[in-house]
Amino acid sequence: MTDGNPVTIVEEELKTAILFRRLEESMKIKTVTIVIPVIFFCFFFPAHVFSTENLLKNPGMENISGGKPDHWNTWQFNQSLARFNIDTKDPREGNRYATIVCESENDARYTQEVQVKENTLYKISGWVKTGNVRTGFLGANLSIIDRFYTSRSVTGTINNWKYLELYIKIARGIKKITISLGLGGYGSMNTGIVSFDDIRMEEISQVPAGMELAYIEPLEPVKEGNNEGKDITTARGGQFPLVTIIIIILVLALAGGGIFLVIKFKLYQKLPVFLGNWLQSVFSPPPEELKGLQRIIRLPYIKAAGILILTIALGLPFFLDIYESIKIEPYAGNENHYVYLAKAILEGHLDIPYKLHDIAIFKGKYYVIYPPFPVVLVLPFVALFGMKTKVTIIGVALAIVCCILLYRILAKVHIEAKYRLWILLAFFLGTGYWLCLRNSQGVAWFAHVVSVFGVLLAIHEGLGRGNGFLTGLFLGMAFLSRQLSLFFVFFFIVAIWTNEKRKSTKNKIFHAAGFLGTLGVCVLIYLGYNYIRFGNFFDTGYSYLELGGFMGERIGRHGQFSIFHIPFNFVYMFLQGFHLNYGDWPSWVTSVHEWWPIDPFGTAITFASPFIFYVIRAKWKKSLLAAAWVSIIIVCIGTLMYYNNGWVQYNTQRFSMDFFPLFIVIVALGIQHGKKPFWKALILFSVAMNALTMLIIPPAG
């Protein structure tokens, strides 16, 4: 406190000024010592300071024009039934959010197109709340247009905002994708109210453990860059002329074969008279000319040329197809659960880190529901190559061994050599086996390939040396790949008992007991495998699947196995013809693009593989034939009672591969004893239809 003296006042003000000056200098020094390190840290470690850029425009729905959020489009399956609104009551952030109202069943979405980078990981996230959304169907979700992958689905009434996220990896050839915020989805429509707010899409370096990853591939073939506009697309769906040439050759070969059959077997005589007379005038040349034509056709080089053309026409599509199947595994193990399971076993546990498609979720962990034996074949390759293991190559190696096994089995049942290669052609290229082989990077398809391998090994042993222990082991391998293989037990008991190498009753009982013993051990392994995972010997994990759409509705109403599933499955197994949709065909065929070019539920085996009708002419030892039919029928009934028929599939029913390894032996016996002229044509027809399918449908990846 001053005394009012002017000198004193000046001194006090001077002291105050000096004090403030020192304080200011001190603050500058502290500011420099703090700010410079912060700037240095931010410059060198920006990812840890600044949030990742949101690639979506208007993510909070704040900017609107004409009552709709800017940069967002709307889409609905049932036009004009859904309402798209902007609401302001209780937003997650900001002042607004977007709402979809579906009073009747619909699939409705907000969409936005986004530019993306190839071979890059992204996280899509957002907040949602719902009102009266039906359970049992796909509810509010985040997804990618034209893809089946979705985030977790929210149903019921959720008044508080719930967080959703979806992780994706972009494949080579993808430049942009369309983000979808929707109610319902492919194969599932729903009702109710859903609201979305604060949607983000950001680039990430890795996916957190336990999260499902969707692999986004091109819907159209990828064009290589830096080729000055030259189109060198893959053999399917592009402008590459090889595909067109193959189909032309294929059509000509089929047409030429049909004309040849009409001439050789005088089929025109069986047509109505008004048409038959005209055809006879065309196809009945004078005898000398016919003989001359036959001599030309039978010339060695003409015959060799015809075989070569037919081989190229039918074989090249399969070669290109399996090559592409191997090539499309850039993110190894993404679909094949066995790769992840093998890696988990090598690390000492049975749960896998990611929520893949068709996975069991139990106590917060993810388990493979499929039986475990195929992982034994994958395990050494994963130990050597890790997640880069290409399962399709393993499948091809098994297919080669299976060719040898089936050839030897046909010899054991006394099929003449002239029929054997044709039977191999029929089984491996004219049935659903090829579908399973080409899609071996998918877990369910690879399980079929391994199961066929096990059953053929068992047949080879059971009809050969008849060693019950080995036969039981091989059938156990098949059972631990596809459970219904267990019901071949009836056939193998009879095969071992009637085997010529088992002379005495004591020896027969010994090997029959050995068969049941080793098979029983395999069954116990499966029960133990279930107990370790789920604490219940008989819990396979299928009940923990998260199913939506019509599949979820089916299993919700009738369960996993039910007689109510038989009508649908029976129609597709035995009655449904080859069903084309005018949809997602290659661009050189049509400009119309829908999702499925061929009925995804498949084609009946009677139409896709018509050579099977020769089973009615089969002659074999009565006990073996009866036991084979009992086993086949039981396995077939099991597949018909299942809640789905094996979709997605083309020109086949893949579940038929559960009984086909034994069924093809009966077919071979029927062809040999039937001696009718059409069996080769029917086999070629089956192979040709598969070849056509290969050209239309890209491998699953």
Image: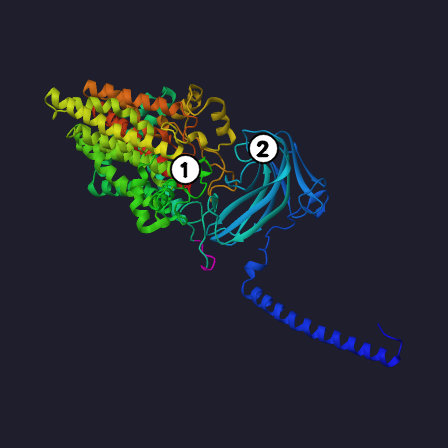
Is 541 on the left or on the right of 165, as rendered? left
Q: Point out the stretch of residues depicted in magenta.
A: 226-231
Find residue 373 and report its image quarter.
Answer: top left
Check disc 2 and report the residue beneath it: 155
Residue drawn at 54 percent across, 29 percent down: 136
Check disc 1 and report the residue beneath it: 367
Q: Is residue 267 above or below residue 345?
A: above
Residue 224 in the image, given as x and y percentages of width and height? 44, 55
**Do we see residue 482 in this rendering?**
no
Find residue 53 and report its image quarter.
Answer: bottom right
**Do we see residue 665 in this rendering?**
yes
Q: What amino acid does circle 1 point to?
A: Tyr
Residue 230 in the image, given as x and y percentages of width and height? 45, 56
The quarter of the rendered structure image containing the C terminus is top left
Find residue 673 and report its image quarter.
Answer: top left
Query: Of discs 1 and 2, which sits in the foreground?
Result: 1
The quarter of the rendered structure image containing the N terminus is bottom right
Residue drawn at 60 percent across, 70 percent down: 36
Q: Earlier in the sequence, mark 1 or mark 2?
A: 2
In-front residue for pair 437/373? 373
Residue 469 in the image, given as x and y percentages of width and height? 19, 30
Residue drawn at 57 percent across, 31 percent down: 189
Distance between mark 1 and mark 2 Cα atoms: 24 Å
